Amino acid sequence: MPSDETTTPQPTAKATTRKAAAKKSPAKKAATKKASTTARRSTSTAAATETDGTTPATAAAAPADAPAPAVSDTPVAGGKFPARHTPEEFAADTPAAPAPRTELSAVEPGAPAVGSRFGRIPVTDVSPVLAGGAYPAKAVAGEAFPVRATIFREGHDAVSASVITISPEGEETRTDMQRAGTPGLDGWEAWVTLPTEGDWRFRVEGWDDPWATWLHAAEIKLTKKIDVDLVCAEGQLLLEGAALRAEQAGKRSDAAVLRGASIALLAERPVDELVELIDSNGVRRAMRLHGPRLLVSPSPEYPVRADRERALFSSWYEFFPRSQGAYQDEDGLWHSGTFAGSIERLEDAAAMGFDVVYLPPVHPVGQAFRKGRNNTLTPEPGDPGSVWAVGSAEGGHDAIHPDLGTFEDFDRFVGRAKELGVEVAIDLALQASPDHPWAKEHPEWFTERVDGTIAYAENPPKKYQDIYPINFDRDPEGIYHEVLRIVRLWIDHGVTIFRVDNPHTKPLNFWAWLLAEVHRTNPEVLFLAEAFTRPAMLQSLGRIGFHQSYTYFTWRTERWELEEYVNELAYETAAWVRPNFFVNTPDILHAYLQYGGPAAFTIRAVLAATLSPSWGMYSGYELFEHEAVRPGSEEYLNSEKYEYRPRNYDQQPNLKLLVGKLNAARKAHPALQRLRNIQFQNSENPQVIAYIKRTGEGDDADAVIVAVNLDSQHTQESTIHLDMGLFGLGEADKLRVRDELTGQEFDWGAHDFVRLTPQQPAHVLAVISTEQHQD
C-alpha cells in the first residue's frame, strides 16, 4: 500500500564523474599499498526480490606475510601529538578487507550457494532490483528515479553512502545518498538521472565516514570544552587529507578552503569561532566532495535500462482503418475504408495533439465461424467480422487485408504519420482464425483435441470458434522465430510500437525472449501490454520488458481508489510498470461513462491526461459514445469490432477542443511528463480530488496543480489545502496560476476554495510565478 508520507522526489546531490576503467590515483595506490590489501569488487548478481540486494565481499584478506603498515613519526598539532596517521591516508578511498568469501553451503548445509555476504559496511535492501537483477529496472533518459538501500554498521561511527551509475560505455558517475525514511531504520536514498539511452548498471557503496564521525563528536566536545586540543588535532588531519585529495582532483579553490580551515582550527581560539568554522557551508561542501571514504563496501551491480522518452510519455489515439471512409451502397452492401482514406483521421488525431496512432489488426480476417454484428454467431452477407480473428486465404500476420490496400499504401500512411510527428503502433494479436495459413501449414502450433480437430478458444460457457489459440509448448523454436520474423517485417515497414493483445495468455518466458531479441537489434521499438489481468501477471510482464501496460484505471472512479492506485504506480511499482491510462477501449465502456453524461467524459480525460504520463482514447470517445449493448455490459452497442462504424467527427458537441488543450498542456509542462512526482493534496470534499505534479529546480522548475470534480452530475465545492513547502514557500505566500483549459489566471495560496460544475468540472493550473509574503 502507498505511504502517506511520500515526498517530492528531488536529486539529492551533485554527481561527479570518472572512468570505470581509469587507473588509480597515486595517492590511492599508496594507501592501498600501505594497507597491503588488494581491492576486489564482485559483480555477481544476488538472487533477491525487487527491493533486496545484498553486498559481496569487497577485498581479499591481507597475505599472512604482508609487512605491517608504515606509520609516520612526524608530529602534528604543533608537536602535541604523534602522527599515527598521515593526511595522505585520508586523501584516498580505502576498501574494506574482510575475510575471503565463503559459499553459503559451506556454513549452512543445504542452503543454496547463491547471493553475496555482507561487506565490511553492510549494504542491503537495494532497489530498484528486478528478480535479483535478472531484468533491468525501468527509466528513460533524463528521468530522475530513486535508488534506495539499507546501510548500517556496528557501534556509533558514522557511515555514508553513494550510488555509482555505470554508462553503457563504462563511465562511472557518483551521486551521494542521503538518509531517508523513518529515523533509526538506516534507510538511504539518492535520486539519479541517466542522461542517455542504453543499458546502464548501478551499485550502492557504503563507507566509513571519518569526517561525519569527527564532526558529530566535535560539535559536542567543543561546546563542552572536552579534549579541545585533541579534537582540533584530529580535525586538522582530516582537513589536510581532504585538501590533498582536492588538489589531486584539480579543485584548487576547494583545497584552499580546506587548508585554510585546517590552519584556523586552533585550540586557542574561542569555542564559538571553532564551531562556526566547522559548520560553515564552504567547509561542509568541500568535505562532502573530498572527505575520506574508508572501508568502501559495494553492493553487486544491477541493470537499469534508459529507454527513449516515448516509453514513458505518450498520447495514444486508436481507430479502425476499415471504418474510415466506409460506406453502404444502394444495395445495402458495405465497402471498406482504406489506408488512403485513413489519412484524414491520422491528421485529425495529430491536430488533437496525439503522438501515437494505434491501429487494431490490419490483417486478413477469417471466414470460418465469422462473427456478425454485436458478436452474433449469424453474420449477414458483407459483415466484416472481428479483426482479431486473424488470417484467411489472403494471408496471415504478415499480410494486409486487401480491402485496406497494399504494403505500399501502408508505407505511405506511415510516412505521412512521421511528417506529422506521429508514430504508428499496430496490434500484435498472437492467435489465428481457422482459415489462417498456420492452421494448414503448422497444425503442431495449436492444441489438438482427442477427435483430431484443433481446439478453439473457450471460456466456458462462452465459445470463440473463430479463434485458435497458439500452444507455445508444442514447437517453441518454430513459433518463437515465426513471431520474431513477423515483428521484424513490420519494423521494416516503419512500425516502432506494438500494442500486444492479451499477452497474459502467452508464456512469460516467450515474451522475455522476444522482447530481448527485438531490443538487441531495434532498441527504439516499444511494446504496450494489454494486460487486463491479475496483478502478479501484469507486473511480471513489466518486469520482463514490456515498456508500458494498460491498467486498472478504468475501474478506479472514487477519490480514495484513484489516490491509492496512482500512489502505488508512482512510488511502489514504477521501476517495472509504466502505466498507460486509456479512458476507453473497443472492449471497455465503463458504467461511469454510460450513465455520467458529457461531464463524465471530460472528467475521465482530465484525470487520465494529468495523472499518468501516458494516456489514450479509442475513437468515438470525443463524440460521447456511451450506449452499451445491454444493461450491465461494458461492450459497446453496435461495436466496431464486428462492423463498419464511419463517423462524423465534426458533429457537435464533441471533446476535440478539450482533448487538444490537454495534450498541449502535457507537451508544455515537463511535470505532466513524469510518473514519480505526484503529490495528492487535502481536499475537504471527497468528491473533489486535488494533486500537484512538480519537476525541476530553479529556472527549470515546472509545477501543475489539478483539481477535479468526480461527480459528473452535480456541482461540488471544496477547500483545497496545498502543501506550500513543495514550492519552498510558507503559509502566507502566494502562487500565480493559469488554467490551461480556460486561460484564466488566479492567485492561489495554502487554502483555496473551488467550485466545480458539470460544465467546468476541472482546473489544470500551471504555476507561472510565486510571491513571498513580506512582514
Image (cartoon, rainbow, N blue to C red):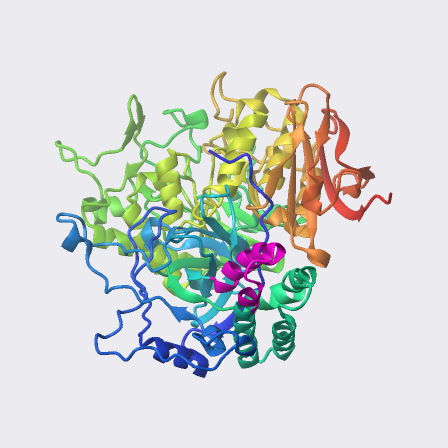
Of 100 and 221, nearer the camera is: 221
Q: Where is residue 716 in the image (x, y as percent from the top left)?
A: 72, 22
Is residue 414 in sight in this rendering?
no
Taking the spot 45% from the left edge, 56% from the top edge, the residue there is 157
Left or right: residue 430 compared with residue 241 = left
Left or right: residue 689 compared with residue 330 = right
Q: Taking 355 as reference, is 378 above or below it?
A: above
Q: Position of residue 395 (x, y in %)?
A: 34, 49
Q: Is the magenta stretch mostly helix, strand or loop?
A: helix
Q: Give the range drawn in magenta.
A: 209-232
Is residue 755 in sight in this rendering?
yes
Farthest top residue in view? 631
Q: Taking 574 as reference, is 158 above or below it?
A: below
Left or right: residue 593 compared with residue 716 = left
Taking the spot 32% from the left edge, 38% from the top edge, the residue there is 505
Taking the spot 33% from the left edge, 53% from the top edge, the residue there is 54
Of 264 and 754, nearer the camera is: 264
In magenta segment, residue 226: yes
Of 139 and 188, nearer the camera is: 188
Q: Position of residue 79 (x, y in %)?
A: 53, 78
Task: Give the total of numbered labels.
Answer: 0
Q: Taking 657 as reference, is 160 above or below it?
A: below
Q: Where is residue 688 in the image (x, y as percent from the top left)?
A: 66, 26
Left or right: residue 29 compared with residue 9 = left
Q: Taking 61 as reference, is 370 above or below it?
A: above
Q: Which quadrant of the figure has residue 232?
A: bottom right
Of 156 and 361, nearer the camera is: 156
Which quadrant, please, contains the C terminus?
A: top right
In magenta segment, residue 496: no
